Image (spheres, helix red, strand yellow):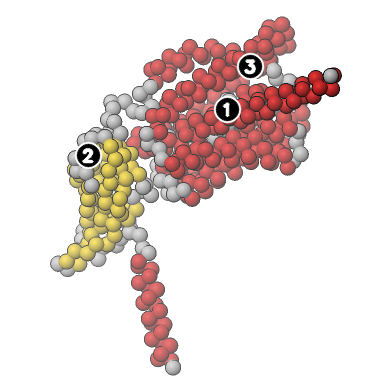
Amino acid sequence: MIRKLFIVLLLLFVTLEEARKSFLSFLNLEKTEILFFTKTEESITVRSSYKEKQPNSSYLFVQLEDPKMLQVVNVTKTTLDITNFTINLVTEEEGETNLTVQLWDFEGKQERLIEEIKNIKVKVLKQTKHSLFQSSMPIDRNILMLILPLILLNKCAFGCKVELQVFQTVWKRPLPIILGAVTQFFLMPFCGFLLSQILALPEVQAFGFVMTCSCPGGGGGYLFALLLEGDITLAILMTCTSTLLALIMMPVNSFIYSRILGSSGAFHNPVFKIVSTLLFILIPMSVGIVIKHRMPKKANFLERIIRPLSLILMFVGIYLTLRMGFTFLKTTNLKVFLLGLIVPALGLLFGYSFAKVCMLPLPICKTVAIESGMLNSFLALAVIQLSFPQSKAVSASVAPFTVAMCSGCEMLLILLVYKTKKRCIRTIEYKRKKFSLV
């Protein structure tokens, strides 16, 4: 009986050991399923956790589907705690292809295949002298210089709409600001991380989405708060507060999630970018507040032009975002686009739901939702550009541009539905009054 039990346990141990071996993953291509090449020469790193039985007995073999598009220059092996391979490639043509990576080892005089990664997609973009960011910058810079006075005038006009009594009320009851901060810096980054893992995005793109979800409210928040009849003063205060908090929370989130995602490298906090964004909001709006108290007639004029001026700037901003974003859409896929749609929608949903549960007034609920969903994606872009080399930055930058484009389109759709519904209600009320008079 004991002998039979020993044999059963031995067989069970052998079976479990073989099953464990079948699930071992020796190769890891930086968790990347799709590689984007934008330069003539590119290199990729393959990490190996395989332990050689003899020194330098393992090697990496790279099989190319289209040798005309890609050519292998060499494969370099580095041995530290684990064995890493660097594959140097030369790109010839633009297009898409696949490659297969195999890990082999010598056992005596025979070769044995340890593991392979099949069908790694490679997208080769047009080889340009400038980066994707710089391709449309001269035209975009000229447009920005032309509309910069209008932007400052618009912010000054928003300052004329600020009610100091609201500042005092929010100071005594800061619940809306707390709800917005919790949503922006705790809940949204976690959702971005979770969704990127569910969709199995590469670690660089996943980090891009996490950093986008960690951004404070964008400058378009108080614009849509005005158009959707929210609380403008609260929107401005929430934007300034969240931008100030971003000095601490963005580097904290980048440190935490970069460790979880396994991203390597030093991540930089764009302090100058955040401070300049904050001053760019505060200075012209402070001028508007002074104008309102010192020159009421000019303040009334600025308040009258705020809506048409805001609409013009909104469409110009969407045009510039789409112009730069379409460059990155060449490297995007359905998963990235889907996540770009979900992220701002989740921010809107969370912000509105939390404010509604706390029984806050409807204008405040709208404002919290807008500030939670409209993110300053270009701060995430600054973090990415400072933290990654150009080849990885292009892939990671897809996230903030996709979120910026999708959030703008979603807010325009919400605005269109809101205005249409409001006009229909007014039409129905007018017909009812007309019918009652008859």
The residue sitting at 46% across, 48% down in the picture is 199
Mark 3 or mark 2: whose residue is earlier in sequence: 2
The residue sitting at 22% across, 56% down in the picture is 59
Could you give the CA–CA distance between mark 1 and mark 3, rounded to whole angstroms?
15 Å
The residue sitting at 36% across, 77% down in the picture is 14
* Residue lying furthest right: 437
Q: Nearer the viewer, residue 26 or 302?
A: 302
Position of the C terminus, as image quadrant, is top right
- State the image coordinates of residue 163 (x, y, percent, origin top left): 73, 20
For disc 2, the neighbor class at 10 Å (few under 14, some 14 to 19, many from 20) is some
Q: Nearer the viewer, residue 255 or 314?
A: 314
For disc 1, the neighbor class at 10 Å (few under 14, some 14 to 19, many from 20) is some
Mark 1 or mark 3: whose residue is earlier in sequence: 3
Q: 304 left or right of 204? A: right
Find residue 12 and report its image quarter. Answer: bottom left
Q: Amino acid at mark 3?
A: Arg
Q: Name the residue beneath numbered marker 1.
A: 412
Q: Nearer the viewer, residue 79 or 5?
A: 5
Residue 307, disc: 3
Q: Is residue 436 above or below residue 1?
A: above
Q: Name the residue beneath numbered marker 2.
A: 69
